[in-house]
Image: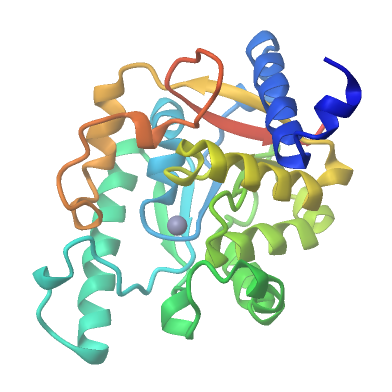
Amino acid sequence: MNWSAIASFGPKVLHGLSLTAQDLATRQRAAPAGLAETSAHDLYLAPHCDDVCFSLGAFVRRRRQGILLTLFSNSGYLARPWTVTTQGDERIAAISSLRQREDLAFAREVGLRRCLGGLDEAPLRGFDPFETAKADDDSRRLDGAVTAAIFAAARKDHGGQQPWLFCPMGIGGHIDHMVVLKIVLRHYRALQARWRIAFYEDLHYAATWRERAAGLARFQNLAAPLKPRRSLWPIGESADKLALAALYPSQFATPPASIKPFTPAQRIPAPAHEALWTAERP
Ligand SMILES: [Zn+2]
């Protein structure tokens, strides 16, 4: 095959090939040693109730300490909308409270202290959740509120080893995930004074190859100066992670039965896993 034939595949195919090459390299490389260090001050940023569970549930369950900060904790989304019958503001309050209780049950199960950001999710702010192009403006509008929530959730003095901050990568393009990512990248140096920073592949979005390829291309573009590298964290028993996901029954039409939506899509054989990306110098 010659280069003009390869070029004719177009940039998407070339990116897919390079992503597969990166996934292969990840399999052969040990995870950064620092990521094995855990602290009660580790801070997990969840745009919504369920994001840390679906994306990092097995990782968190092994570590058993830290803080879960759910930023957009006001929500009107249910997989079975008819299960809440009230309307208007009362409905949003009832759904938010239901989802927050599910989040609290997860946090208790895995040993995290849970904090709420109290922000409205995208549809409550008048956005289609996947209007990704509006994320930049929205991230500037929400910058103060999100950074205040992050620093409010942090305990004053962590002493000793620098804790970790875990941030979504925005795979899937949900505007709330993108807003969190953009704010963390904007304040990377200031946050780095307090935390080591890692980015997680958002599940269930990253479980679809096309969404994952597009999301990683966007992330690698936004975070290019960090030269981020992937590490893979096998989840162990699938049933254990599915049991954690099942702590969010309001988000499923039927209870989760397959691990497929909870592991990143790969084009090489890989165990069910969760994935983190860290800068060369996190
Ligand atoms: Zn989410």
User: Does residue 176 appear left or right of residue 137 in this picture?
Assistant: left
Side of 124 where 25 appears, left or right: right
**Is residue 164 something one can see in this rendering?**
no
**With respect to residue 90, does 262 lie above or below?**
above
In the image shown, does 117 or 173 lie closer to the viewer?
173
Quadrant of the rendered image containing residue 216? top right
Quadrant of res 15: top right
Name the quarter where the C terminus is drawn.
top right
The quadrant of the picture showing ligand 1 is bottom left
Of residue 238 and residue 149, the one placed in the foreground of this image is 238
Numbered disc total: 0
Rendering coords of residue 65 (x, y %):
45, 37
Q: Is residue 114 left or right of residue 109?
A: right
Name the residue rendered at 57%, 49% in the picture. Answer: 171
Expressed as whole percent of the image width and height from the top left, the position of residue 118 reads 44, 74
Colour treatment of the image: rainbow
* Residue extending furthest toward the bottom: 88
Residue 32 x, y percent position in the rendering: 70, 21
Q: Quadrant of the N terminus?
A: top right
Q: Is residue 260 above or below residue 124?
A: above
Work out whether residue 186 can be spotted: yes
Q: Is residue 163 above or below residue 69?
A: above
Above/below status of 127 relative to 223: below
Q: Residue at x 71, y 72 (%)?
A: 136
* Horizontal side, residue 30 vs residue 60: left or right: right
Residue at the image point whose x is 71% and y is 50% from the top: 218
The front one of 37 and 31 is 31
**Residue 242 drawn at (x, y percent):** 26, 32
- Residue sitting farthest toward the top: 28
Q: Residue at x 68, y 12 (%)?
A: 30
